[in-house]
Image (cartoon, rainbow, N blue to C red):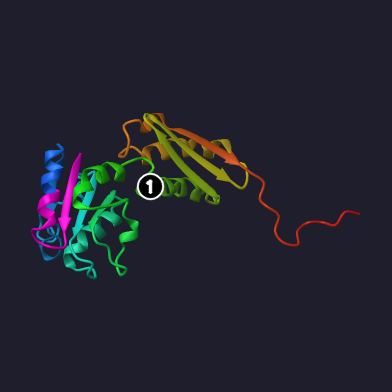
Amino acid sequence: MRILLSSSMRGGDAVEVLDRLRRAGHTVYTCRGGERCALAIGGTCPLADHMADVLVHVRERPDPPVDRDRPFLCATVAEVPTVLCGYPSVEGPWTRADAHCSPTGVVDAAAKAVRPTSATAHRRVRQAVADVLRPHGLRSPRRLEISADHDVIEVSLMFERPVPVRVREELRPAIRAALAALSRYWAVARVTILAGTPAPTAGSARTPR
């Protein structure tokens, strides 16, 4: 796996995390963020250049976000799976992390973050569905579920009303493509599109004559 490692502090837990990831056989890039952002100084960014499968960000103290926390924000915007290793802060966007861990659990957390059932996977699929539905003037599904069992990925969409066949044919490949970076079995993901009758609103029931 290709991992981009960043940290809000120098040394400490970040060194342990780097060592654990490399010993697990992962390719690890590092990012200092802030004023040393690779894009800001004309360099190559693993996020922008699609070189990273996941970002691991180390926070060694529960302080408010600083410039060196910026790589986490970059990964969130780029919809790259994220792992927060260490301490979150109520003032930051840490609830969007796909996995949280201590330095000792970083290898398992990185694997969890790139599962097709992760929060990032759900965001990618929701966006793909919205992109297909928008030109047809259709509403988003009222429920979207993703499950995975080894090489079988199941995606289920529940709409309030039946979806035209043409739209169904567009949805399935779009959803599979959204999962491409998260599973090697994306091309055979099972996509089920269901429709149910909307629940009656208050006062809509008629009194029998």
The quadrant in which residue 39 appears is bottom left
Quadrant where the image shows the C terminus: bottom right
Q: Is 77 positioned to the left or the right of 69 in the image?
A: right
The spot of residue 12 in percent (x, y) is 10, 58
Which residue range is magenta in the image? 1-17
Task: Name the amino acid, label 1.
Answer: Arg
The spot of residue 2 in percent (x, y) is 18, 41
How dense is the environment of label 1, judged by Cα within 10 Å: few (below 14), some, or many (20 and up)? Answer: some
| Number of dots carrying numbers | 1
Q: Nearer the viewer, residue 204 or 7?
A: 7
Q: Is 205 positioned to the left or the right of 18 in the image?
A: right
The spot of residue 30 in percent (x, y) is 12, 51
132 drawn magenta: no
Query: Which residue lies at the image location 10% right of the left edge and 57% below the top edge?
Result: 42
Q: Nearer the viewer, residue 39 or 23?
A: 23
Say if 155 sits above or below 35 in the image.
above
From this viewpoint, which residue is outermost toward the right?
Answer: 209
The quadrant in which residue 52 appears is top left
Local secondary structure at mark 1: helix
Query: Which residue lies at the image location 61% right of the left edge and 48% below the top edge?
Result: 160
The spot of residue 81 in percent (x, y) is 29, 48
Residue annotated with mark 1 = 124
Quadrant where the image shows the N terminus: top left
Q: Is 114 positioned to the left or the right of 164 in the image?
A: left
Say if 189 sits above or below 34 in the image.
above
Query: Which residue lies at the image location 27% right of the left edge and 41% below the top edge?
Result: 111
Q: Nearer the viewer, residue 35 or 203?
A: 203
8 drawn magenta: yes
